[in-house]
Image (cartoon, rainbow, N blue to C red):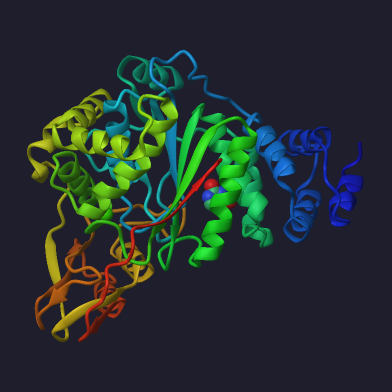
Amino acid sequence: MKTVDLIRKKRDGEKLSREEIQFLIDGYVGGEIPDYQVSALLMAVYFKGMDDEETAILTDVMANSGTMLDLSKMKGFPVDKHSTGGVGDTTSLVLIPLLAAAGLTVAKLSGRSLGHTGGTIDKLESIPGFRTDLSREEFLSLVERTGLALADHTEDMVPADRLLYELRDVTSTVDSLPLIVSSIMSKKIAGGARGIVIDVKTGSGAFLKKLEDSRHLAQALVAIGVHLGRKISALITDMSQPLGHMVGNALEVREAIDTLQGHGPQDLEDLCCALGAELVLFSGELSDHSEATEHLRKLLHDGSALEKFVQMVKNQGGNPAVVDDLNLLPTASKQIEVPAPQTGIVANLDALSIGRAANLLGAGRFTKDDVIDPAVGIEVVRKVGEHVNKGEPLAILHVNSEANLEQAKSMVAQAYTISDKEVATPKLIVERVTGD
Ligand code: URA
Ligand code: CA
């Protein structure tokens, strides 16, 4: 087999076979096929696409390019959740313990923040002592004993995705549906989950802002999961405004603890229960959607999910006392209000601007090597549809330095549009995409 022939084949819109895809991925990961040939191939895929079968094969081959986790011996049904990334998207922090409380197995591999969206690893690391650099043995043993653990992605898993992603980034081939789908799904498949739910965000703070694009991605992810024998569904959810009230690492841990104590923001609780219900149904524990949702709501309100959270924090070296004393979390030195310029109803709260402003304050990274400040971020006081009087706070900036402060403040002020008319709250769960 010659790489140049396979590039030509894809250039001419033909379908690559499993053997051909295997040859290309093995060759690239093994260092035998050079970047310039894979760059040309990626551009051919960008223009000619791949059908579901071909994308499923690419996903499978990529997943198998490194270590695969085997969760088949675990007591509970192994599940995973993926979000395409949002602003103040605190769901994983709540869902991991919530799903474990429901008896499911959660071996969660997560990422750090990059760009305007946050990362679960950074958020949980704001708990003093919390470790995510677990060895594979330690990680799997925690999952086996307790039903949950969270660790950073390791280099030995899905090396094909890491290499391809870096190349896509510099060849303008990130925005290709089969490449996005295989990138996301290869990591889920390698992680060993049998049941997967995808939270595809839509709106200004999302990776895909238009509903139609989010829908295409959701359908493609579900189709590939089904092809590979997984139970999978996707919820398309609103990211036109931030989720919950907190945006920032320790701030989101506070919000997650509030939610695990049964008094978190309604949208965050509703989304966690809805995403979790999909997985409870896949596990076969319950068969009715609203019953599954209410079961999870009960576990949030009776302390069961909080108990699993405390167990996870303790097992991963964190201080579990944070649950009773939120002031043990990193706290910013100053809180600065952004006042409403007029009385009215919030008509728009642009998630992307809030995410960028939180980044400017130091909550996120602009490049991989930036160091984040766990304490800083933005507390969104008023959300879309809510009334505010002139001079009352729309948002509160939690800051530790004057750097970028004025810019962040004006960005937050401009993220808000105040109207004198009634405005409906945006629908949180826009669509559900299932594999049937
Ligand atoms: N997220 C991923 O993991 N991969 C992509 O290609 C895009 C988003
Ligand atoms: Ca939040």
The location of residue 152, given as percent across then percent down, is 42, 35
Residue 151 visible in the displayed image: no
Q: Nearer the viewer, residue 412 or 132?
A: 412
The location of residue 275, given as percent across then percent down, is 37, 43
Q: Indicate the quadrant where residue 63 lies.
A: top right
The location of residue 36, given as percent across then percent down, is 79, 52
Q: Is residue 390 above or below residue 386?
A: below
Residue drawn at x 47%, y 46% is: 234
Residue 216 in the figure: left or right of residue 47: left
Q: Nearer the viewer, residue 259 or 396?
A: 259
> In which quadrant of the rendered image does the C terminus lie?
top right
Residue 147 in the figure: left or right of residue 394: right
Residue 227 visible in the displayed image: yes
> In which quadrant of the rendered image does the N terminus lie?
top right
Residue drawn at x 19%, y 44% is: 259
Residue drawn at x 13%, y 84% is: 343
Q: Indicate the quadrant where residue 160 lies.
A: top right
Residue drawn at x 20%, y 86% is: 420
Q: Residue furthest front?
A: 288
Q: Is residue 131 above or below residue 216?
A: above
Q: Nearer the viewer, residue 357 or 389?
A: 389
The location of residue 265, given as percent across then percent down, is 19, 53
Label tally: 0
